[in-house]
Amino acid sequence: MMTIYRDTALVDTLSDEHAEIIRATLPLVGANVDTITRTFYDRMFTAQPSLLRNLFNRGNQAQGAQQRALAASIATYATHLVDPALPHPAELLSRIGHKHASLGITADQYDIVHEHLFAAIVEVLGADTVTTNVAEAWEAVYWMMARTLIELEANLYADAGVAAGDVYRRAMVTRRVDDPSGVVLVSVEAGDDGVTEHSAAQYISVGVTLPDGARQLRQYSIVNAPGERETTFAVKPVGARQGTPAGEVSNWIADHLAVGDLIDVTVPFGDLPTAGLGSAPVVLISAGVGITPMIGILEHLVSTAPRCPVQVLHADESAASHPLRERQRNLVANLPNATIDIWYSDDDGRDSHAGFMNLSELTIDDGADIYLCGNNAFVQNVRAQLTDRAVATDRIHCELFSPNDWLVS
């Protein structure tokens, strides 16, 4: 069983001199952070093109999502270091650490990031601005964050029983089910050297070799209950939209993957706190494909805590686009103390609310554990609604499917 490290501590503190420099330069770095991160990634991928082909998500790079994620994460961490009264970024670090472990990131790769990130800072801000003292202060911030993540990831690898970075296994596809919504359910067999036992709402990374020879990696939620011989994950094909490229890996899986094929699958990771799941009422709030970790939680509750009070809330465009709709309803039907409310923005009148999710008319148990997953706008909107209802923030557990972890910190 994977340990969830949500009490990650800062491994060091800034000196007074460095803290003063960070306070003074944060606005300047913040004003130029987009240019710095673009320059950083350009430099790194020019020096090591294999990182873009075989590790980083090319779609996120194309639309700038990964660049914004790196910049915002470091800025969030630095801001806390100079103002400890702000909320501790432990959850942010935990999410990043689990995602890194799922990709097989190792300690030496932090040196690569350091080299090109600080070269980019000097290139963008100029050597006259980035004096020796300024560089030392920001390097202290970077290495504090890096050491914290390296330690966290080492613990995650140890818990998984693998050497650092050795998370990929070849697994055979044993089943494929195409959901009416377009989502594809893929099952792989967990052999002796295959996928290890998972916790509810965890995910795996899947690696496929695309037609251009690039080995791209994506993370997908596990939707079956823990303890089964097979591991089943859900894949939603992604079409191209303005400013957003089509999903390379998801679309390849939907178009080509068949029973009997071999794919690279990692051991499970993911830090949604589900160890005590079922000991208190549960509220599951999702939109779109954000339903997938909630399906995993429902499967777990059906098999281990069927009497648990459960409130299921889901938003989608329509019944046709609602992923795993029948599976969700069947699971709810197997939980005698569960209720379900659905919102469709294109309301079709089939046992649903019209429009966007509105929690104002619902009663939510003050002592419930609340799990929330969807796109950035949905997560932020629902968190705001829960905050307005004075729901304790430590009861709200969020998952995002894009590299925007700072948004839920």
Image: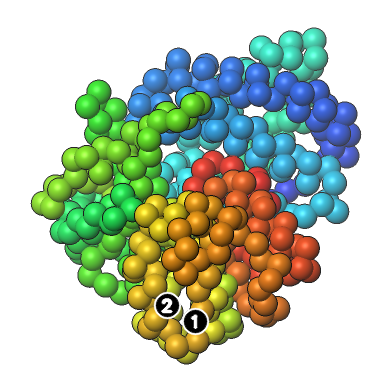
What amino acid is labelled 2 in the image?
A: Val
* 221 displayed left or right of 92: left
Which class describes the residues within 10 Å of circle 1: few (<14), some (14-19), or many (20+)?
Answer: many
Q: Is residue 154 visible?
A: no
Q: Nearer the viewer, residue 289 or 268?
A: 289
Name the secondary structure under disc 1: strand
Q: Quadrant of the N terminus?
A: bottom left
Name the secondary structure under disc 2: helix
Which class describes the residues within 10 Å of circle 2: few (<14), some (14-19), or many (20+)?
Answer: many
What amino acid is labelled 1 in the image?
A: Ala
* 277 displayed left or right of 298: right
Q: Which mark sits nearer the N-terminus, 2 or 1?
A: 2
Write the residue at 28% across / 56% down: 179
Q: Is residue 237 visible?
A: yes
State the separation of the CA atoms marked 2 and 1: 6 Å
Question: Which of the 4 image quarters holds residue 234?
Answer: bottom left
- As drawn, the label of residue 332 is 2
- As drawn, the label of residue 9 is none
Residue 249 image position (x, y, % from top left): 32, 38
Write the residue at 29% across / 28% down: 214
> Which residue ends up furthest to the front in the rendered image?
349
- Asked if disc 2 and disc 1 are in contact, CB closer than 8 Å, the reply is yes
Per the image, the residue denoted by label 1 is 338
